[in-house]
Amino acid sequence: MSEPRGSAGSSGPQARVEVGSPNVGRVVMVASVAAIGGFLFGFDTAVINGAVAAVQKQFHVGPVSLGLAVSSALLGSALGAIIAGRLADRFGRVPTMVMAATTFLIQSFGVAFAFTVYDFSFWRFIGGVAVGAASVIAPAYIAEVAPASLRGRLGSLQQLAIVVGIFIALLTDYAIAAAAGSAESTWLFGLPAWRWMFLTEVIPSVIYLVGALRIPESPRYLVAIGKYDDAKRVLGEVVGGLNLDAKIAEIRKSLKTEHKPRFSDILGGRAGLLPIVWIGIGLSVFQQFVGINVIFYYSTVLWQAVGFTEKQSLIITVITGGTNIVTTLVAIATIDRFGRKPLLLVGSAGMFLMLGTMAYLFAAAPLDAAGKPHLSGGSGPVALVAANLYVFFFGMSWGPVVWVLLGEMFPNRIRASALGLAAAMQWVANWLISTSFPSLAKLGLGYAYGLYALSAALSFLFVWLFIKETRGRELESMTESMAGDRPAVAAAEASP
């Protein structure tokens, strides 16, 4: 593969901007710190699972109030994603990480020591704001710091951190409940076990806070605010020391504007937003509409509903979590080799086949006395294999690749704001899928999984028509995608 071209130079053919060899150890370290925000995302998503029943009994609430209390974190995340871009453009990427870590640390105590379902919901919402902000800043920061040759793999750290956070939260809940006897039982210092489940969020919050205080600011942001010497120093730390002045000039050209980045920069085009922003929103929405969070939020209940025992369902859930981690590692190993678009297409096709299989099995399954489908004979193992293959196809494609693309596909001037809006729509889509599944399940699991299969098929067409490959491209080469209304991730083609 030939070396990407920069955008500095004359109006003729683009000049080549040489950089040195990446400082791999340094860039991996700073990207890993940013990705801890993804860990908080996954941990907060899953830690509630072990505490739901205990919280309901503690506060004597019905299913509707409980559902709103649990889902308040998702709505908070949508708000956090929206405001994160503006905060990042005004104060910087690193200060926004520090604010998110501090907010999440405070909410950990708030949720753990809540007195009523109302303050519990409030603190869950505040925690969601922090998680939503972190989910935006991590991919933006990693994309702006990482050398082009490593950007895909480093950007995938966000998704790896998310799935590891989910897995660790499930194990933590299990360990605390086992040590106390149940989530409702009293444990250390006279506190119920479920409160300790939320207190464990303090540990990753502190690690994230300390780490954020020790990493450099994004060089693209430093150029945007006129701190060129600082930007040159950071670039020298991560990409080496050749032609850094030319690289700074290239970044300055990509940021050409008379004002600092602002949210209104993403407005325009024929539909209110720039075409590239609509594509980012489409990626975010499809990532959720394929139904992945149904597996993570409802898997234990789902498998019990179709005939597996509680113990078997818990084991299946752990296997699914492990599968997600392994397949994310596969994506990290292959994303800079095969590219973003091929992985998305393979993932969409695989998910469509597996979801279609599950839809057929659930629709054809006989109903038990309670009117629920029962997978008998070979149907149960086939459904189990299909579910884990579905997670495999998601984990090696749409899980990590969407976050990588959202971090790199937008031009420098609008990256934070556009990513914030796209991520906010992802949280809204997550909320819609999560809250609608119980109602869809009452109509029939076949209908639910059929709908997700349809979304997977549409996601394939979306990628085929609108996504352009960004592998190996410098961020500054994305600038031309701002021109016109052509729906492309990057208008400039990679050099032959």
Image (cartoon, rainbow, N blue to C red):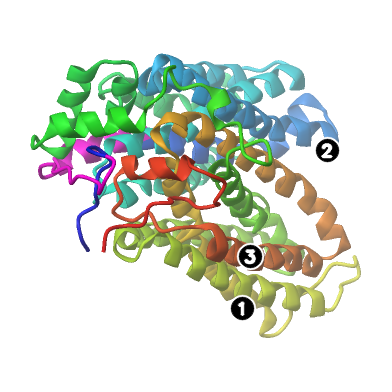
Residue placed most toward the observer, 281 or 334: 281
Label 3, residues with CA under 10 Å away: few <14, some 14-19, many ≥20: many
Q: Residue at x 39, y 33 (%)?
A: 412
Rounded to the nearest angstrom, the CA distance separating label 3 from label 2 is 30 Å
Q: Is residue 18 magenta?
A: yes
Residue 229 - label? none
Residue placed most toward the observer, 123 or 140: 140
| Residue 351 screen position, x and y as percent | 58, 68
Please tell me which of labels 3 and 2 falls first in the chain. 2
Rounded to the nearest angstrom, the CA distance separating label 1 from label 3 is 23 Å
Rounded to the nearest angstrom, the CA distance separating label 1 from label 2 is 32 Å
472 sits to left or right of 49: left
Label 1, residues with CA under 10 Å away: few <14, some 14-19, many ≥20: few
Q: Kindly identify which residue carries mark 3.
A: 456
Q: Residue at x 38, y 49 (%)?
A: 156
State which region is magenta: 11-34
Q: Kindly identify which residue carries mark 1.
A: 381
| Residue 463 screen position, x and y as percent | 54, 61
Q: Kindly identify which residue carries mark 2.
A: 63
